[in-house]
Image (tube, rainbow, N blue to C red):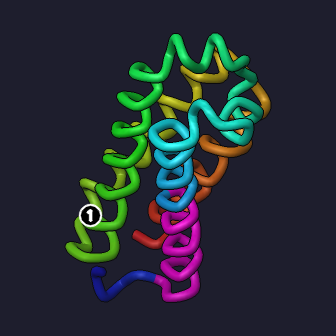
Amino acid sequence: MPPKTSRPVIILASIFIGLVALIHAYILILEVFLWETPRGQRAFGNTPVSAAATKTLAANQGLYNGFLAAGLVVGFFLLHDLPMTFFLLGCVIVAALFGAATTKIVRILFIQGLPALLALIALIVAR
């Protein structure tokens, strides 16, 4: 991190970025491994028939969520690469906006978009 950063704000950004990464790692687990289970079906409002029919698509989506989580961990926590972190948080926000426009508005905005937006704001303030 650059020396001019505010330590409390960086800690707050770290917490939010970690939360975003954990959320997307959990979504990976739901979409790749638990899609056809009662838990996975409940999370996404699927029936056993629709879950079976969309299993491959869900696994693909899950990988992308995993890539977002891994990118945030590597970019922010390991490489301290702020441009990469800004980009990935922006991707999460855009995905949340798209998901809100096409599915469950409040749920996706609150669970995925809000933590990413708060992390992005904290990073901007810290710079």
Q: Is residue 70 magenta?
A: no
Looking at the image, can residue 16 be seen?
Answer: yes
Circle 1 is placed at which residue position? 75
**Residue at the spot 29% in from the left edge and 55% down from the top edge:** 71
Looking at the image, can residue 120 be seen?
Answer: no
Q: With 41 as the anchor, is 96 left or right in this view?
A: left
Relative height, residue 51 to residue 40 (above, below): above
- Which image quarter is the N terminus in? bottom left
- Which image quarter is the C terminus in? bottom left
Mark 1: amino acid: Gly
**Residue at the spot 65% in from the left edge and 12% down from the top edge:** 49
Magenta stretch bounds: 6-20
> Residue 122: where, in percent of width, then height?
54, 65
Q: With 20 as the anchor, is 76 left or right in this view?
A: left
Rendering quarter of residue 45: top right
Q: With 84 as the anchor, is 47 left or right in this view?
A: right
> Residue 76: where, in percent of width, then height?
32, 68
